[in-house]
């Protein structure tokens, strides 16, 4: 199937790009075909975010959104906010507002579900004539044999058994060819990673660094609900003192009608292989400053997703012949704000604005010549030029050194963040580089002590498999594994991961996918991969030793079924 523009991923980036192309085509009275695919069974099913939403990009995409007949799902204005340093499992210090970094100012923002927002964006896109196909996972990038340009993507075959044989339900994947293909797969997209390697897009850039966010949504009793309330914390339990090098913190937001959205983000550059982000999150909920928000409530949803934290210096080259990377596929998240929805949307819009004139010119010329619309899949560098002049660049440059400053401990990180937010605005004359991948930052097990996490009480905290049911995750069990051990890394799980690092994947995976069996009578252990539990967070492709997992897409539609995330 052929389209003018193919977009992989129906998140804020992909949908904003599709909408912008159609808006421009409408203005010019031209017919430009746009298709968006998503691996989730529905739009939004794989979207997990905080989310305090900054409407800056939305204001540009739909300047009239406040008066629209079907307005966006933004009914909770950001209200009171607090920033706490938890100094122990009982105590905390509140940081006065005057000392909050300006980037944490949420005036004019909204507390939303990004998953619901994407459903709304999809409705707007469809009204403009965008074709949206959820349940279709892009499995392979199509390259032109001669020029090497990207021609589009092929979706995953469905109905193949674990044994490799075709089942009755077998259907061949479809080739979706686009004159331009926009990759909007979010953090650590599988096709996007292939493209970055193929076109060497990371050359000369910092190594990307990531965080893993685990999140729950609770309904809480009336009287406990504080509309628009925003809380962030640092300190216990992740950081045991000012010199701790573990990057991360928590968020807690109150969204109408009676929801508390809460979660923890743990920098995947952590050293201690015994850390379990999931269990850190569970014990954090027992701090009195947190538990008071959810006591008497009910947890209705659980999930996890990685986010890019490398910032400005880790953004790859954005364009290549035949397409571009947009949103978190490239990595425009602002790690101080923990916000990337607005930058994802804006990057999609900028890509659309750059590719539209080229496609439109070629279409008009073909029409005039009475020929069918032929087109070379060219590279359109204007997208990157414009992005580097946009407000995305302004805000990311301001916090460009923040994450790296935390490599020297939480106190150094906070001091540097305050300095760059209040004084230098990111123009300090030094650049803190990151040249080591998160997978290589894990320390040896022998240098750390095992962490004795408390048992979940089943009221405020839950064991992982119980919680996993709240994500709605489902994969057909009888399909080839989508989590593959890279052939060159076959020795890594038992030879390195288990022996040197005590198998950190069995702790960081927020879905308990990786389990090492106990030793048999010969002392042999085995790695079991329960791929059907996978939440598509992508942490294993980032943090396993030597990045031994290649994350590929399962059959379209498989994975979590988020509805309020
Ligand atoms: C815990 C957490 C808290 C956050 N809090 C906030 C916040 O408060 N405010 C804020 O602004 N931002 C926040 N963010 C960041 C924000 O969620 C991201 O920046 C944003 O979602 C990026 O948008 P995107 O469109 O690039 O990617 P995504 O939102 O990840 O969307 C990508 C889409 O592509 C689909 N996809 C991926 N690969 C394929 C494939 N091969 N084939 C088909 N479909 C595919 C996925 O299913 C998904 O629907 C948070 C993120 C996390 C993880
Ligand atoms: S298997 Fe990998 S992608 Fe799936 S939930 Fe676990 S860490 Fe995340």
Image: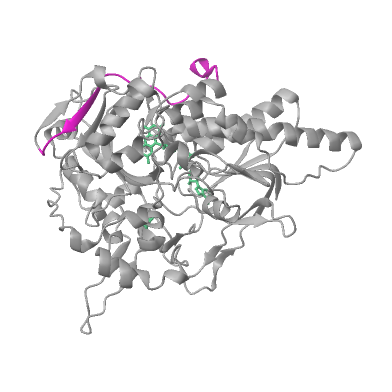
Q: With 75 as the anchor, is 368 left or right in this view? A: right
251 sits left or right of 61 in the view = left
> Is residue 97 shown above or below 331?
above
Residue sitting at 46 percent across and 42 percent down? 314
On the image, the x and y values in percent for residue 367 come to: 86, 35
| Furthest residue toward right | 369
In terms of depth relative to the viewer, which is nearer, 310 or 254? Answer: 310
User: 232 or 291: nearer the eye?
Assistant: 232
In this rendering, position of residue 516 left or right of residue 312: left
Q: Can residue 300 be seen in this view?
A: no
Q: Name the chief secondary structure element in magenta.
A: loop
**Residue 48 percent coordinates (x, y):** 39, 41
Identity of the residue furthest to the bottom in this view: 522
Q: Is residue 351 above or below residue 480?
A: above
Is-magenta flag for residue 329?
no
Q: Is residue 15 above or below residue 461?
A: above
The range drawn in magenta is 62-89
**Residue sitting at 11 percent across and 39 percent down?**
89
Estimate the x, y position of residue 356 in percent, counting from the top left. 69, 33
Magenta span contains residue 70: yes
Nearest the eye: 384 or 167: 384
């Amino acid at each position: 199937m052929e389209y003018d523009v193919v977009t992989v991923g129906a998140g804020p980036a992909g949908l904003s790009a599709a909408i912008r192309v159609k808006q421009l085509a409408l203005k010019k009275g031209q017919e430009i075909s746009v298709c968006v695919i998503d691996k989730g069974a529905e739009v939004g099913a794989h979207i997990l975010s905080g989310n305090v939403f900054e409407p800056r990009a939305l204001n540009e995409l739909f300047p009239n959104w406040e008066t629209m007949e079907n307005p966006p799902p933004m009914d909770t204005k950001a209200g009171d906010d607090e920033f706490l340093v938890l100094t122990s499992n009982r105590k905390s210090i509140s940081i006065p507002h005057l000392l909050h970094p300006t980037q944490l100012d949420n005036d004019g923002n909204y507390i939303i579900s990004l998953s619901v927002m994407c459903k709304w964006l999809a409705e707007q896109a469809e009204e403009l004539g965008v074709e949206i196909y959820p349940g279709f996972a892009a499995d392979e990038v199509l390259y032109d044999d001669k020029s090497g340009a990207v021609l589009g993507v092929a979706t995953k075959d469905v109905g193949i058994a674990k044994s490799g044989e075709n089942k009755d339900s077998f259907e061949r994947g479809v080739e979706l060819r686009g004159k331009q293909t926009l990759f909007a797969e979010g953090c650590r997209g599988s096709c996007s990673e292939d493209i970055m390697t193929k076109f060497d897009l990371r050359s000369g850039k910092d190594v990307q660094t990531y965080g893993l966010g685990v999140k729950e949504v609770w309904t809480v009793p009336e009287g406990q609900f504080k509309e628009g309330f925003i809380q962030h914390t640092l300190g216990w339990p992740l950081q045991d003192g000012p010199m701790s090098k573990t990057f991360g913190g928590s968020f807690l937001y109150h969204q109408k009608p009676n929801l508390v959205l809460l979660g923890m983000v743990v920098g995947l550059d952590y050293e201690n292989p015994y850390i379990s982000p999931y269990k850190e999150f569970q014990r954090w909920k027992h701090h009195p400053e947190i538990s008071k928000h959810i006591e008497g409530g009910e947890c209705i949803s659980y999930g996890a997703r990685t986010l890019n934290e490398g910032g400005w210096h880790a953004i790859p080259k954005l364009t290549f012949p035949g397409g571009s990377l947009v949103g978190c596929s490239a990595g425009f998240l602002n790690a101080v704000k923990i916000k990337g929805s607005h930058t994802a949307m804006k990057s999609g819009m900028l890509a659309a604005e750059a590719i539209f004139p080229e496609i439109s010119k070629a279409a008009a010329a073909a029409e005039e010549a009475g020929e069918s619309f032929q087109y070379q899949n060219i590279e359109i560098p204007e997208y990157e030029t414009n992005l580097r002049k946009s407000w995305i660049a302004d805000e990311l440059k301001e916090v460009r050194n923040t994450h790296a400053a935390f490599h020297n401990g939480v106190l150094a990180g906070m001091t540097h963040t305050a300095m760059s937010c209040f004084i230098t605005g990111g123009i300090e004359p030094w650049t803190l580089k990151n040249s080591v991948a998160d997978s290589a930052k894990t320390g040896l097990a022998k240098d750390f002590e095992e962490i004795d996490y408390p048992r979940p009480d089943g009221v405020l905290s839950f064991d992982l498999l119980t919680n996993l049911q709240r994500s709605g995750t489902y994969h057909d069990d009888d399909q080839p594994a989508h989590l593959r051990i890279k052939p060159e890394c076959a020795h890594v799980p038992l030879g390195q991961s288990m022996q040197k690092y005590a198998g950190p994947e069995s702790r960081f995976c927020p879905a308990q996918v990786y389990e090492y069996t106990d030793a048999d009578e010969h002392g042999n252990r085995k790695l079991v991969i329960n791929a059907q539990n996978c939440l598509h967070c992508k942490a294993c492709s980032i943090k396993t030793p030597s990045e031994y997992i290649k994350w590929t897409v399962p059959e379209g539609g498989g994975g979590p079924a988020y509805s309020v995330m």
